[in-house]
Amino acid sequence: MSELNLILLGPPGSGKGTQGERLQEDFHLPYYATGDILRAAVSEGTELGTTAKQHMDEGGLVPDDVIIGVIGERVESPEAADGFILDGFPRTIGQAEALGEEMEKLNRSLTAVVLIDTDDEEVIRRLGGRRTCAKNGHIFHVEFDPPKNEDVCDVCGARLIIRDDDKPEVIAKRLDTYHSQTEPLVAYYEEKGILKRVDGSQSPDDVGDRIRALLATLRLEEEL
Ligand code: AP5
């Protein structure tokens, strides 16, 4: 494939971060996860972090004008010249339109938008048990992907933490936000013919295999 410009779309807890980490290893492309970028800004106490924190704690979205610039400068950076993987962006029609304009300006196009289709009940089970490495961001689940030692990262030995927005009342708000503001992107990208659905209820390995298979199909189609 000449260029792989990929978006991972799906509700909170659908596995975007889990699959993003795998895809990044497979394709060696820059991976831009807006949630991770915003959490880093919050912990560094930057102006972006201060603006973002309240929205994140409440399960709402950071304003479009704030986040669009953050992603725009990464997409047009030299490291993203051969492609990129976006996780958590776009999340509104306004963000999708801004990304479309950015791609047009760069004379590039999106390869695919992979929707990791997962229902609300499963989301609640997953986010309730998520543990994240405080140092490298690796994601675990107490039941579905437990660390070898409780609350310790298998990869680097750092402490595992529970995210502030994984409290039950914030999870409910994040799901509402997803259905009202982000889910309309499914129809938006379906209309553009680049939406690819993956059944997110399967195991992480099966979801990963499915995504790899659909990217391989796109590569074959491109060669025809
Ligand atoms: P963000 O960090 O992007 O949160 P999110 O979209 O809610 O997604 P999550 O990171 O919670 O879940 P995920 O899909 O990555 O699932 P994961 O792989 O971790 O955003 C946080 C906040 O930042 C937003 O609420 C908003 O305020 C703000 N924000 C971010 N982007 C923004 C934007 N563009 N505009 C405005 N505001 C923005 O998996 C979850 C758990 O399930 C893990 O424990 C994992 O081990 C487990 N798991 C994963 N896959 C499977 C599987 N197949 N089977 C069983 N368990 C699995």
Image: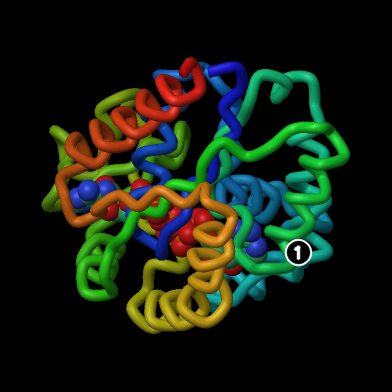
Residue 155 in the image: state x and y as whole percent: 31, 24
Left or right? Give the position of 159 relative to 64: left
Residue at the outermost front position: 224
Left or right? Give the position of 146 relative to 88: left
Residue 157 in the image: state x and y as whole percent: 31, 27
Residue 161 in the image: state x and y as whole percent: 37, 51
Left or right? Give the position of 206 relative to 169: left
Ligand 1 quadrant in view: bottom left
Is residue 66 among what the camera can see?
yes
Judging depth in this view, the residue of 21 and 149 nearest the camera is: 21
> Dividing the picture into quarters, in which one does residue 12 lie?
bottom left
Judging depth in this view, the residue of 194 and 30 nearest the camera is: 194
**Residue to which mark 1 is pinned:** 50
> Dividing the picture into quarters, in which one does residue 55 lie?
bottom right
Q: Is residue 186 above or below residue 170?
A: above
Disc 1, SS? helix
* Kind of residue sitting beneath label 1: Thr
Decide if ligand 1 comes within 8 Å of the CB at mark 1.
no
Q: Residue at x 33, y 36 (%)?
A: 211
